[in-house]
Amino acid sequence: MSLLNPVPPLAALFVTLVLAAQASCVHATTIVQRDIREVAEGATLVVEGTVTAVESAPVMQGRAIASTVTIAIEEVLKGSWSADRIDLQYLGGSHDGRSMSVGEMEIPAVGEHGIYFIRDPRRQFVHPLKGWEQGHFIVVKDGPHGEETVRAGNGKAVVGLPADAAPPAQDQVIGKRVAAGLRTADGPDEQALSAAAFRDWIRSR
C-alpha cells in the first residue's frame, strides 16, 4: 500500500512541507467554496463505496503523518476505474502515540458508506477530494420508508441540486464545507433528495 508519492504536485508538496513544519494540529486551512457543478466536472473519478480500512503511517522522513483510506467500490459514477477498491490518502492521522490534524479535513471512518468526488486517483494531494469536504457525501438510510439519502459536508441532508446551466459568477467564499448551488435541509421537515436522484445527477455530468 503506497504512501505519499516522493514527488507530489508542486503545490501539494509546498503545503505539505509547511504543515509538517508546524505543530501537530493545524487549524488555519483556507478552502474556497466551489459550485457543485465545478466539483463534479473537476473530479476525474466519482465512486460510491464503503470504507473498509484506515491506516496511518509517518511520511516525509517522519515529519508528518498520512492516512490511507481504503474504499470497497460499489459503483463508479464518473470516470474509469477497473479495480474493486481504491486507496485515498489524506494528510494527517495518528500513529505510534503521535497525532497530526489539518483544519477543515474530515478523514472518513471505517464503515462509512459514501460518494467520493476524487480529484485524480493517480496523483496525490493534501486532500484527495475535489473541494475537500465539498466533494465528500455520506449515504444513509433515513428516508420516511427507509430509502437512502445523502448528507453533505455539513452533516445535513441534501434537498436540492442545481440545474444543468453553467454556474453563475460569484465572489470567492472561504471556509465552506458545502458547495454552492447545493441545498441542504434547514429543518427536519424538509424532504431529503434520494441517493438515487443524486447518483443520476452525477452520471449526467
Image (cartoon, rainbow, N blue to C red):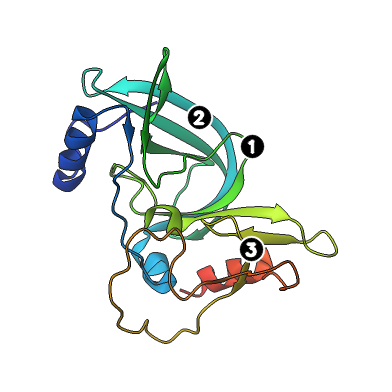
Task: Give whichever of discs 3 and 1 has the lower sequence position.
Answer: 1
Q: Residue at x 32, y 27 (%)?
A: 24
Q: The residue under label 2 is which amino acid type?
A: Val
Q: Give the residue at the far bottom of this rendering.
A: 165
Q: Residue at x 31, y 45 (%)?
A: 122
Task: Give whichever of discs 3 and 2 has the lower sequence position.
Answer: 2
In this picture, is 43 found above or below 109?
A: below
Q: The residue under label 1 is which amino acid type?
A: Gly
> How far apart are the alpha carbons under marks 3 and 1?
19 Å
Q: Left of 117 or right of it: where is 126?
A: left
Q: Secondary structure at mark 2?
A: strand
Q: The residue under label 3 is which amino acid type?
A: Ala
> How far apart are the alpha carbons under marks 1 and 2?
10 Å
Which residue in the protein does label 3 denote? 157
Q: Residue at x 55, y 59 (%)?
A: 152
In this picture, is 70 found above or below 174?
A: above
Mark 3 or 1: the one toward you: 3
In this picture, is 53 found above or below 49?
A: above
Q: Quadrant of residue 75?
A: bottom right
Q: Percent from the top left, x then y, of residue 81?
A: 45, 50
Q: Is residue 105 visible?
A: yes
- State which quarter of the image contains the N terminus: top left
Q: Which mark is residue 54?
A: 2
Which residue in the protein does label 1 denote? 111
Mark 1, other Cα within 10 Å: few <14 / some 14–19 / many ≥20: few
Q: Percent from the top left, x then y, of residue 27?
A: 33, 41
Q: How many marks?
A: 3
Mark 2, other Cα within 10 Å: few <14 / some 14–19 / many ≥20: some
Mark 3, other Cα within 10 Å: few <14 / some 14–19 / many ≥20: many
Residue closest to the eye, 40 or 171: 171
Mark 3 or 2: the one toward you: 3
